[in-house]
Every structure is written in C-alpha cells, then in structure tokens.
Image (cartoon, rainbow, N blue to C red):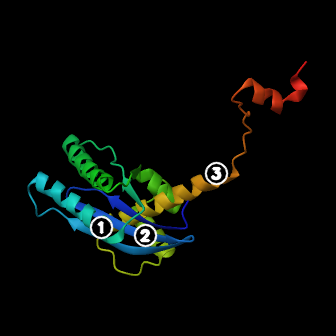
Amino acid sequence: MKDSQIILGIDPGTLVMGYGIISINKSNVSLVEMGVLQLSKHKDHAERLHLIFKKMESLIKVHQPTAVAIEAPFFGKNVQSMLKLGRAQGVAIAAAMMTGLHAEEYSPRKVKQSITGRGNATKEQVLNMLQHTLNIVEDVRFMDATDAVAVALCHYYQQKTAALKKDNAPKIRTKKTTNSWASFIAENPNRIK
C-alpha cells in the first residue's frame, strides 16, 4: 500500500450523487472535500447521467485520485429505481475507467461494518464515526456526501487490512526449477548415482 494516496468515494444516485475525497499521508487520513451533485431538477434521465459523468471527470481532474471507491446498489423492490441507480453507478465507473482508474465496489453493509464495526449501523452512526475520525465540523445537509466519504474510508481500511494480511502471511517455499539437465546435476550433486 502506498504511503500517500487520494481516494474518491462515490454514493451513486440519479437524484443526488454524493462524493467525498480523502487524503492519506503516512497513515494520516484527512478529508479533502465532500459534497453532492443535485440532479432532481433535471427531468431527462440521460441528461442526469451526462451530468454525473461530467462531475466525475471534474473531480478526477481537480483531485487526481489514486483510487475510486463506489457504493454498490442495494437490492430494493422497485425495479425501475434499481435500473436507474445501476446506470448512475455504471456511468461513474466508466468515467473513472476513462482516466485509467479502477472503481472498487463496496456494499452498503460492508461500508457500515468498516466504519462503525456494525453492518446494520444507521446513517447517523456512520456520520458520528466520520466526524470523530476525520474531525468533520461542518454542518452536513446531505447524508449522500457522508456516505461517499464513508465509502472512500472503507476502501482505505480494506487496503490496509489486505496489506497487513499479506505481510503476515506464511512464506511458501517454492521448488527451484532448472532449465537443463546440466544445471540440475550441478545444483543437485548428491542425487547422482
């Protein structure tokens, strides 16, 4: 894991898209920016998707993130809402890919678990933990913004956990391969009869 990185978190939506950018510098995590893109005044769904793409392009250009994390859609009963949300998510992922970034997806439950220790935590509990962890003092009007920050922080925690597991994994000895019989005999003289 890199000592310095910038993570862009996205909470996709077709009415409100939340975004949050965090900076990590030698394990010190700080909030760079958070906000929302309000799309409800635009009636045309294609126009909303275009605005999501443009906002993603702008955020990536300004902040130069090293990683993008996006909240995966939860499964609801309204199929039309799910389709629209999936399109919004797809557009955000495509915008990240256009700049060479891979967007890692996290379920809402995984995000809550990473931030609060409880997968069924409320949005308010997530906000309280973010305020404590990142010293957020500003008044938060939209939980979509803090959800996006939580997704970015979740990505950082997941990377950190994976790096620790990799460092502590038992080392597996592999057999040495040889290119020819001559090199095998030279490396294993005790096996010759």
Is the residue under label 2 in contact with that under label 1 (CB below 8 Å)? Answer: no
Q: 58 above or below 94?
A: below
Q: Amino acid at mark 2?
A: Ile
Q: Looking at the rendered structure, which numbered label has been put on residue 52? A: none
Nearest the camera: 90 or 72?
Answer: 90
Q: Residues within 10 Å of mark 3 (few under 14, many from 20)?
A: few
Kindly identify the residue that appears in the image at 47 percent across and 78 percent down: 135
Instruction: Locate residue 187, reporting x and y percent.
Output: 82, 33
Kindly identify the residue that appears in the image at 37 percent across and 61 percent down: 9
Q: Amino acid at mark 1?
A: Lys
Q: Which residue is mark 1?
A: 61
Q: Residues within 10 Å of mark 1 (few under 14, many from 20)?
A: few
Please indicate, yes or no, whether residue 95 appears anywhere in the rendered image: yes
Q: Which residue is mark 3?
A: 165
Q: Looking at the rendered structure, which numbered label has been put on residue 22? A: 2
Inter-mark Cα distance, 1 to 3: 33 Å
Q: Quadrant of residue 190?
A: top right
Q: Amino acid at mark 3?
A: Lys
Q: 181 above or below 129?
A: above
Kindly identify the residue that appears in the image at 12 percent across and 52 percent down: 46
Mark 2, secondary structure of its residue: strand
Work out which residue is located at the far front of the displayed protein and give it: 182
The reply, left or right, for residue 16 in relation to residue 65 is left
Mark 3, secondary structure of its residue: helix
Nearest the camera: 79 or 192?
Answer: 192
